[in-house]
Amino acid sequence: MTMTRKLRDDRGLDRGVPFIFTVDGVAVTAYPGETIAAALIAQGHAGARRTARRGEPRGYYCGMGICWECVMIVDGLINTRTCRTEARPDMRIETQHGIGDQP
Amino acid sequence: MIAADLAIVGAGPAGLAAAGEAAALGLSVVVVDDNPRAGGQYFRQPPRQFRRDGSASLDREAARAAPLLAALDHPAVTYLPDAVVWDMPAPLALAVAAGQRSQRVEARAVLVAAGAHDRPVPFPGWTRPGVVSAGGAQNLLKGNRMIAGLRIVVAGNGPLLFVVAASLARAGAEVVALVEAAPLNARLWRAWPGLLAAPKLLRQAIDYRWTLLRAGTPIRAAMTVTAVQGEERVSAATIAPIAADGTIDHGRAETIACDTVVTGFGLMPSVELLRLLGCALTYDRVRGGWLPQRGSGFETSVAGVFAAGDGAAIGGVEIAMLEGRLVAHEVAAKLGRSGGDPARSAALRRRLGRFDRFRRAIEAIFAPPRDYLGLLTDDTVVCRCEDVTAGELRARRDDGLTSMIQLKSTTRTGMGRCQGRNCMATLAAMVAADTGSRIADLVYPRTRPPARPVPIGDLLHENIPPPDLPADPHLPRAPAA
């Protein structure tokens, strides 16, 4: 995780009160209504999972729920598409390795 | 079970326009959309928690979206958000999974307005975090008001690149290059007459170009991204000239430092449901690839099943809305409800004709190279879900496995969660080139339900009768009589 980057475009927009959730135990800031993937990207965290065969990092790609590259383990649920799942306070999210059955 | 005169799959521009028009004509309508918020990709809405004052440039489209979205509040319209049409067990029946259960929607006519997605074009590094599709970059902007990166290379082919690059620049990104495969300047002058057919869209296009000029973004035409570097995320992109026959001149390659690469190589209609139904398809690369054959009223080869918008042939938002409205009139006339509204239909058709002329001019300007197979090194991943490289596919080919079906079954290409949406087009291009065939003549692996992945638990609550499968599993399902 790198420094917070100014990727949110706040012109003409009030996002409300931010909250925190965790990814692999590290705190991530999100605003109400943002997707998990967006909050991660805003914090410079591009990867979401590692592939089963080659162990490659993958992350947000299609942004419309069809590629399944951004899946993570969200509150214990594997294969959760972070591009279409709203972030909520105190969510516990983990990087998914393979189909979620690898440590 | 929900019954209606017209069932619409997709709440994007085509589906919403059809719903509003159909409700006004007195039809009962069900709209099923797999997104939690209506609007499709073009009119993607930010979450309601975002308090907007309307001054942002992205809010300009909100005024246009409002009347479309209002259709969903009409008493004759039933709207099912966050709902996946995972099968069409009969031409006029949808199997819909939502909220951990599955139900049927039955209608007297069905409009499939399922939209489109980015055409996959693999190159070394395209799977690296920080490489984002054009649609993905737009959705981050529209849905989350966020840019995908600070220093961005936008690369690929087609008019959407200019929209995405300009939107990113307006939202504060440094767009360090727009890399477009077509030799734009050489083609622009001949296309002018067609562009004048839709002055509003032409003004928009000039506005995008002007935004990029002010932002200092160079347009690198007749070039392509050839590789993306970086470890855990993107650090640079390499670009090189590409010729009309797909030849890449690596000798004149340049490397550009960046933290994000946005790629868009055009859109492909989502035709899975139409394939499942056995609708006759034709291959037309200019309009996005495999398209349903449609009559003048946008009816497919299966009676009562219509297709409109980018889910039927890539044409953009204006054409999608006009087609959606015209389908509503067609269905109303067919059901004898109101006889449609001939004067309005004729007016809609005249407008459609003008946008079609504009579309053809844009297609001529952005006509892509023959293929992008020159980008495929042996190490390049073709199938993202199953992690299959071009080298593995070539090794199977050299073993004598040359058909799409053989390559799929032996490598699992196309068998992952994206169901081939990110690899089948590449596999088809590889097989066509290797066997000297046309993509139009290739036999594709059969499409089976579920049309989109659904949790198995959602389906346990419906007693689905066994589908009527053909004896040869690779043949399309026979259309019902």
Image (spheres, coloured by chain):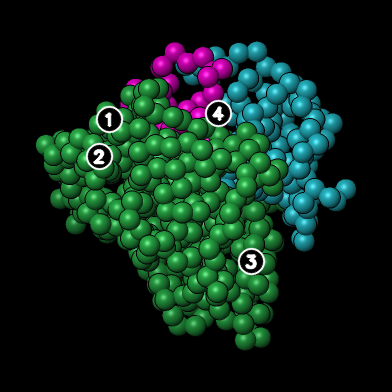
Q: CA distance from mark 4 to mark 3?
A: 32 Å
Residue B456 place in picture, x, y as percent: 69, 47
Upstream in sequence: badge 3 or badge 2:
2
Q: Nearer the viewer, residue B360 or B22?
A: B22
Q: Do badges 4 and 2 share one subunit?
A: yes
Q: Nearer the viewer, mark 3 or mark 2?
A: 2
Residue at the spot of label 1:
B26
Question: Is B39 one of the magenta-colored residues?
Answer: yes
The region drawn magenta spans B35-64
Upstream in sequence: badge 1 or badge 4:
1
Residue B442 place in picture, x, y as percent: 46, 75
- Identify by letter the chain in cyan: A
> Label 1 near label 2: C-beta < 8 Å?
yes
Chain assignment, label 4: B
Q: Do badges 2 and 1 share one subunit?
A: yes
Q: Secondary structure at mark 4?
A: helix
- Identify by letter the chain in green: B
**Quadrant (top left/top right/bottom left/bottom right) for the C terminus of chain B:** bottom left
Residue B196 place in picture, x, y as percent: 17, 44
Q: Residue at horizontal 67%, vertical 23%? A: A30
Chain assignment, label 2: B
> Label 3 near label 1: C-beta < 8 Å?
no
User: What secondary structure prevails in the magenta region?
Assistant: loop
Residue B302, by quadrant, is bottom left
What amino acid type is highlighted by mark number 1?
Gly
